Every structure is written in C-alpha cells, then in structure tokens.
Image (tube, rainbow, N blue to C red):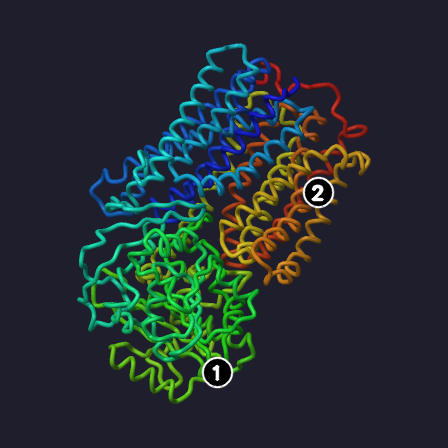
Amino acid sequence: MDAKRETYAGLFLIALSTLMYEIILTRIFSITTWYHFAFLVISLAMLGMTAGAIIVYLMRAKLTDENTHRYLALSALSFSIISILAVLLHIATPLFVPLDARTIMVTSLLVVALPLLCAFVASGVCVSLALTRFPKQLHKLYAFDLVGAALGCIAIVVSLQLLDGMSDLFLIGCIASLSAFFFSLGVPEPKIRSACLLSAVLLGVITGVNGYSASQQHPIVWVSWSKGVQAPHVVYEKWNCFSRIRVFGDPNEVKDLEEFGLSHSYRNHMGKYLSLDMDGFAGTHLYQTDNDLGGMDFLKHDVAELAHSLKPHSDVMIMGVGGGKDILGALLLKQTSITGVEINDNTINVLSSVYGDYTGHIDRHPGVALINDEARSFLTRSNRKFDVIQATLVDTWAASSSGAYSLTENSLYTTDAWAIFLNHLNDGGMLSMSRWYGKNMPAEIYRLVVLAAESLKKIGISDPVDHIALVRLQNPVVDQPDGLGTILVSKTKFTSAELDALEAKCKADGFEIMLSPRECHDPNLKLAVNEDISELSQHVPFDVTASTDDRPFFFQNLSLSHIFDPRVYEESRNANNVMASISLIVAMIAVSFFFIYCIRLPLLMTKDRSVLKETKSLFVYFASIGLGFMLVELSQIQRFNITLGHPIYAISVVLFTLLLGTGIGSMLFEKVLAAVKGNPTSVIVVLLVVAIGFGLVTPLVTTAFAGASTPVRIFMSGVVLLPLGMVLGLAFPLGMRLAFASDHAAVTPWLWGINGAASVFGSVLATLISMFVGISTTYWVGVGFYIITALACAPVSAGIPGKMELLGSPSVQPDASHS
C-alpha cells in the first residue's frame, strides 16, 4: 500500500498539533499545579502515545490495509476532541474536595489523567499507523512527522504571542481536526469527512471568538484558578510562550504592604498598589506613585535594597525588573543610573505602557533604562561595568516550560554566571542577591554562600571571607515565608567604613548580620564561606555544593546520601524542591515498570510466537535509539538553556533544529544507505562519529559565541545542532528497514511502542543524571546507547541476504492466525 499526498499532510498536521499540545500543557499545568505535578502529567501524556503504538500491534488483525485511512482519520479526530475536553475538565474542577491545596491538586489531576491519557493514546495510534503501514515511503513519512513536530515548536511560540492559552488550545484542536480531514480523503465514507471538516471549522470559530474576547480582557474560556485557589478579580492578563502574567486588585484601595524584606518598623505601613503575578504564584506589586516618588520612602528600609544604601550615586544593573520595586528603591536612594534587564516583554509592557500612568512611568525617569533581554547574556556581550548588580527573588517559584521548579536548570545561579557578574563590577562594586531565608535549616542560603565563595575564587580571589556579607530579616508571621536574606559580594575587600555603615543600617532597621568579615552567627555559614563541604554536609542534610553550568540545578538540593534523613522533610523552606525531586525518583520507578510491560504485555498476548523469532536484537535496537535520542536531546536542551538564557528558547531552538535535522536525515536515508553500500552498521558508525565530534566541539562553540546577540546565538545553535539531528534521523528508518527486510513486519508497531517507552524512560533518566551528576554525563551516556545500537544492528543485518533493499510493497499485516 502506498501513501498518498493527503497521508503526508495528515501526518504532518497531527505531529505539529501533538507537539503544540505537549508544550501548551506545560504552560497550563505550570499555572494550575505545582511544577512537579506538571512534569508527571506530561510524562503521562508520553506514556499515552506509547500505549497507542502497543494498541496498534495488539489490534493488527482488525486494522487492515483497507481501513487504515479510516482509523487514521478517526484517531486524529479523537485526539482533537479529547485533548480539549481533558483540559476543560481540569480547569473546571479545582475545588471539589474540602482538603488542603496539595490534596486538591492530586485529586484533580487524577480526574484529568484518564482523558489526557486517552488523548495521547489517540495521537499515538494515528502516528503509529502512519509510520508502519506504508513501508516503501516510511523514511519520507517519518521526515514529515519530524518536520511537523519541529514546526510545532515554532508555531506554539508564535501563537502564544497572539493568543491566550485557552484560545491556543482550541487552535491546536482545529489543526488536529484538519489532520483528520486530510486522512479522511482516503476514506469512502462521506460522513467521516463531513465530521472532520465541521470540527475544524467549529474549533476555528471558537479560537477566533475566545481570542478576541481575551484580547479585550473578557475571555469566554479562561483558567480561573491556580494552585487550588480561585483567582481574584483580574483586570489584565497576557500570555506568552513562557509565562502567564496577571494584574489584579482595586487600584484605589489602600492596603497593608506585603513586602517580606521590609523592616518591622513598616510592617503595618499602608499604600496603594496592584498585584502582578506570573503563573499564579511568583508575585510582585505595581505601586501607585508619581514622578516625585511620593509615599515610597518605605523602600529605603527593605533588606533587599541594602546595596543602594551602602553605595549611593552608583551605576546599577537590576536583573529581573518585575513590578519595578528595585528600580524605585534605587531611585529613592539616589543612584546615578539604573539599567533594568527583564526577559519577559509582557512584564515590561505592563510596567511602562499598560499601567505606566499608574506607576508614574518610572521607565521615563532620568537615568533609567529598561532592556528586554536575559541578564547573563546581556552582561556577557556588554563592555559596560556597574557599581551594583542586583537580583531579588529571581525565579522564585516561577514556572518554566521545562517542568518542575527544582528540576529547572537556571543560568543565573552558577559559578560561571557569578564570575561574569563579578567581572562586570567596578572596583569596590557589589553583587546583591536576595533569597528566602529559612529559620531552622536554610539550605538555599548555605548554598548561596558556597556559590559566592567558589565564584570569588574563580575570578582569582583566594580568600573570600573578607568579600562576603549576609543579612537577614526574619518574618514574625507564622503562615508566611520565614524571612528574607540578602548576600552582598564585593569585588574588593569590604572596607571598615563599609562595614560600619552596614552595621549602622542593620541596627536602625532591625536586620540581623548573619555573616560578615567581622562576625558570624551560624557555624554552618562559617563552613560555607570556607567551602568546607564535607564538614558542612555532616550538619546539613542537603546538597549545598556550588552549582555550575554543567550542573545548573541550584534549587535541586536533595542529597541522595541523605534521602532517608527525616530532617530533609521537616524543613519547610525546602519542602517543595525536595518533593519535586522525590516525585522524579518515583516517576523513574513507575516508568521502569511501564517500560518492562511495554515488552512483556504484548509478549504475553501474542499467541503465535513464530512472529517473535530472532527479534531480540530488534527490541534492543529500538530501545537503545529511544534512550539514546532522549538523553542526547534533553542534555542539549539543558546545555543550550545556559547558552540562550531561558528554557523556552532552549526548548524551541533545540527541539526545532533536532527534529528538523532528523527529518532531513530521514529523507536522505536512501542516499546515505547507498553511500555505505547497503551496510547498516556503517550507518550507525557515521552517526557515532558525528555525535562524538559534536560532544567535543559544542562546548568550544557555545563559549566562543556566549557574548553574541540573542539572534546570533540562536542561529549558531541551530548551525551546530543541525548535523547532529541529521545523523540521528537515520537510526529509526534504518531499524524499520531492518525489521521489514528480515520478515518481521508484523512487530513494527510494537517496535515503535518500545521506542516510545524507552523515550519516556530516557526523559526521566536524563533529568536524574543531569541533576545529580551533570549535563555532559547525560550526553555521553546517550552516545553510549548508540554504541549499543550498533552492536544490536550487526546480528540483525547479518541474517539479511544481499543489499538492504525492500522489494515490492510488503504489508505489515500478519495472517489472521497471528492474532
């Protein structure tokens, strides 16, 4: 059976819509749930797609050549409808059990899990059918599948700039319905074509209506709750590819201030402000003010603004502008110039345009400049130096598309990043970082001090003790964060005058100096500043080693050696991060069983074992390429997050380039096979040579272009990644060719399922290796699986006489007796 043009179009669109759906789910679930739940739900979706391939294998007697297009259309249409219903069910049922928020979240996710699973099963059935029923065009179909998925990475970025998340969901359903319509062109039943076309038109209309309503701030369908809590009255909402920001509150209401770093003398201070949050949890305020900054004097008494008090009349850079609080603090304390660097263009637009009049247009003050960029890359390519570089609670519980909070690599909290920051300070300049400070065991603060000490040594300062000060303000309110700490890292030794000023300021505002060149009020801090990690780890059951670019998971502080230590679970400040890591380990165990049963269950249900003769090497082959590809792919997403500055850039660029490259490689498969004279093992050897070269060259290239502009870094990342993607795209069609040529066509859907199950297992394995060992190790383990692929390829190809040619058009259908 030959594939027609409509088959290619349908496969392209279902791959595009499925990838878009996976990414939009990370956005929606990052808003509605805790981030480790978002990670597990997306893993569940991947399991669903794998299950779809297994279903195709188990139902091979019913899914004949004659009705293939019918089931292609029905499965694509099912994905279109169920994918929307699953999310609508989720956003409609947040609070149906009167329990705590996390219990509510778990219960709600259990309700949405089944339809979500069914949606991806439908997509898995569709893709598996398309890739196993047309063997003569398999490499071309695989290319269309990969290119469609690659463009899905770009499409979701563009569409979320134009639409809100829920309207984008309907757009994805519309694209999937169009996929079903193209498949239905090969079906003689006009009712199926009519249903597919009607669904596409209806969902397209809903997309337009809801999108327009959302642009007018009156969406018909919207996410009305977050983290188990119903949303307050929202006056403004805007989505993009890595966040949803909301503004809410009464602009004229006089309220208590909610700044956790504010001196206790101002605890009951009142003011007018709107609340701004990102993804429903990372919040800040938009203060009503005027050009004279009237009523804002309280910000002079915030522990996060200490550096401005100690170094007035300075050139300042602020990383993460938020609602403009740090800019106001710097203005009030008479700083000469203020450069605010904010990665989220929507945040800048809210501050300077949408609510510019309300905030007094602080962006128009003399000496203030707002720049839409990622702070680290901005500094790397800048020749300018500053007296103060400041970051306050950057990335605190803020979601990214990559998943859980502690599972998210961060380019700002590594020794490599801090070396850049310190080298962009003038002599006597200060780096100021503010983070939450737990009462009992502030592991994050300990790690921050270790990071500061290691970074100072990295720039040539052998004794960091005289360069670090740490100040704390404890919060007396029990049900709020314990407190806020600000670390000040000076490029030169603190002078006596600076330390006198620091002590006087802290005494006046009631701040505690926990660590300075003159004093230390926590023995663990003394160990941290001296980098006595072995001794520190005996007192602190967390990982407090300095994070690096190769292991940039600053918020992941679970130590495997202390995983059973009860103190780990008693420390509330680290509870969310620890539970995210534990969830990942539990997910690893769960997907291990899933991976095993993707092999065992079809084996148990296969009555005629003759179809399984001599298939062991094929199973190893497809499992290895699934594991290898996922480890290589995720390691590069993590690595290029550092290069490009944000997870969504890394996901978009790496996924797009690798998927596009694999699509091109699949299209070129026949030519490559001819070039190696039909020797399958030689194809894998070519893959390994390129992969090894890529692993050796990439660190040099990323370092060389670290200071380039964002467009240049994106372009160079694509140039480097494309050849790797092209050779990775050879492995799957080669495996399928081996299966067909060795008369194992009947098990090809099962092989596709094993490949998918291995990919699920590999996604969790890659994250664990990167978190606990390092990104480079993840990559080389992935290359190791391709070596196993080469070893598995040899015995299969040895049993195939002659060249690797697929003669005729063999069907993948077994005899009826095989069922």
Tell whether 590 sits left or right of 613: left
The kind of residue on which mark 2 rests is Ala
Tell me what residue is drawn at x 69 percent, y 38 percent.
Answer: 665
Tell me what residue is drawn at x 64 percent, y 21 percent.
Answer: 3
Residue 747 visible: no
Expressed as whole percent of the image width and height from the top left, the position of residue 194 reads: 46, 15
Q: Residues within 10 Å of mark 1 (few under 14, many from 20)?
A: some
Instruction: State how far apart marks 2 and 1 are (Cα).
Output: 55 Å
Could you tell me which quadrant the N terminus lies in?
top right
Mark 2 or 1: in front is: 1
Report the front residue among 41 and 536.
41
Q: Which residue is mark 1?
A: 492
Tell me what residue is drawn at x 48 percent, y 82 percent.
Answer: 492
Report the front residue among 772 and 553.
553
Q: Secondary structure at mark 1?
A: loop
Q: Which residue is mark 2?
A: 790
The kind of residue on which mark 1 rests is Thr
Tell me what residue is drawn at x 40 percent, y 70 percent.
Answer: 446
- Image mark count: 2
Up the image or down, 484 lies above or below 630; here it is: below
Mark seen at residue 590? none
Quarter occupied by residue 254:
bottom left
Q: Secondary structure at mark 2?
A: helix
Expressed as whole percent of the image width and height from the top left, the position of residue 495 reads: 42, 87
Expressed as whole percent of the image width and height from the top left, the position of residue 267 reads: 20, 68
Tell whether 61 sits left or right of 676: left
Expressed as whole percent of the image width and height from the top left, the position of residue 118 reads: 42, 29
